[in-house]
Amino acid sequence: MYYGYYDWTYLLVILGAVISGIASLRVQSTYKKYSQVSNAQGYTSNQVAERILHAAGIYDVRIERISGNLTDHYSPKEKVLRLSDAVYGKTSVAAIGVAAHECGHAIQHQENYMPLSLRSLSVPLANVGSWISWPVIILGIIIGYTPLAYLGVILFTFVVAFQIITLPVEFNASSRALAILEQDHILIDNENKDAKKVLKAAAMTYVAALFATILQLLRLILIVTGGGRRRD
């Protein structure tokens, strides 16, 4: 709130939060639905992950359990594939899909998939942009030095760039996972379609996060240029 003005750009933040919230609820509900559907061959997520990794010639990646719900991830630096409580050891189509997706990242790492390498390199810049963009902008506005405020906006673009790079990484990992599950007959009949629905819902959370971040960048630009202030 500015003296004598109101900041309508908060609506952009609210819109971004709503979109992200809807995407998050969608992936949670989709996962819950297909976590009740066991694969016909009785594979566990661990078995599938190990099978996919070994088939790709990857034997130096550990598979570990991590606490939480859908906190699954692959760590390139540690060469560890971590499966959450909701996925580890489960036989559901949803768990198999998520485990295969994380294996997709491990295969990307093995093949030096360019977008994955770019994402890893951009992490420090994205962290810097996330941490100090707002303080720099606020300081620039307080002391009345517009170039400093614009610097803060530029720093925040690193966050947007990171999320843009993330999209092809995530979509490619899902494509690899679904192809392997079908070609190796790990999932059969409608199980592949069900796994695709789970991974598609998960992918949309990244799209929603990017959209919300772009709205945040727009808000920062409007604040710095004065476009976000209207008389109360």
Image: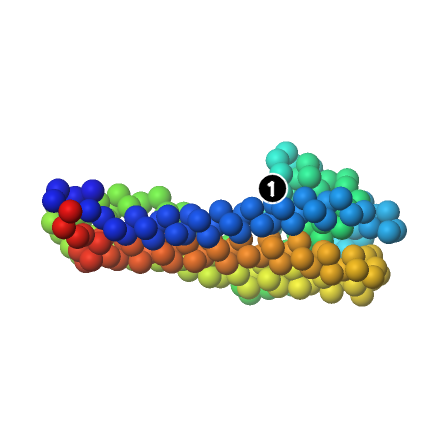
**Does residue 140 appear left or right of residue 118 in this picture?**
left
Q: Position of residue 43 (x, y in %)?
A: 84, 48
Question: Would you place residue 84 above or below residue 203 in this image?
Answer: above
Badge 1 amino acid: Thr
**Does residue 85 appear left or right of residue 161 in this picture?**
right
Residue lying farthest front? 232
**Does residue 26 appear left or right of residue 17 in this picture?**
right
Q: Residue at x 44, y 49 (%)?
A: 18
**Rendering quarter of residue 196:** bottom right
* Number of on-image labels: 1
Question: Would you place residue 32 above or below residue 112 in this image?
Answer: above
Q: Position of residue 88 (x, y in %)?
A: 73, 40
Q: Residue at x 30, y 48 (%)?
A: 10
Q: Position of residue 156 (x, y in %)?
A: 34, 53
Residue for badge 1:
71
Whether residue 220 is visible: yes
Viewer-nearest residue: 126 or 20: 20
Q: Residue at x 83, y 59 (%)?
A: 188
Q: Considering the numbered disc 1 on the image, is that residue within a helix, a strand or a loop? A: loop
Q: Position of residue 25 (x, y in %)?
A: 56, 46
**Rendering quarter of residue 55:** bottom right
Q: Residue at x 20, y 58 (%)?
A: 227
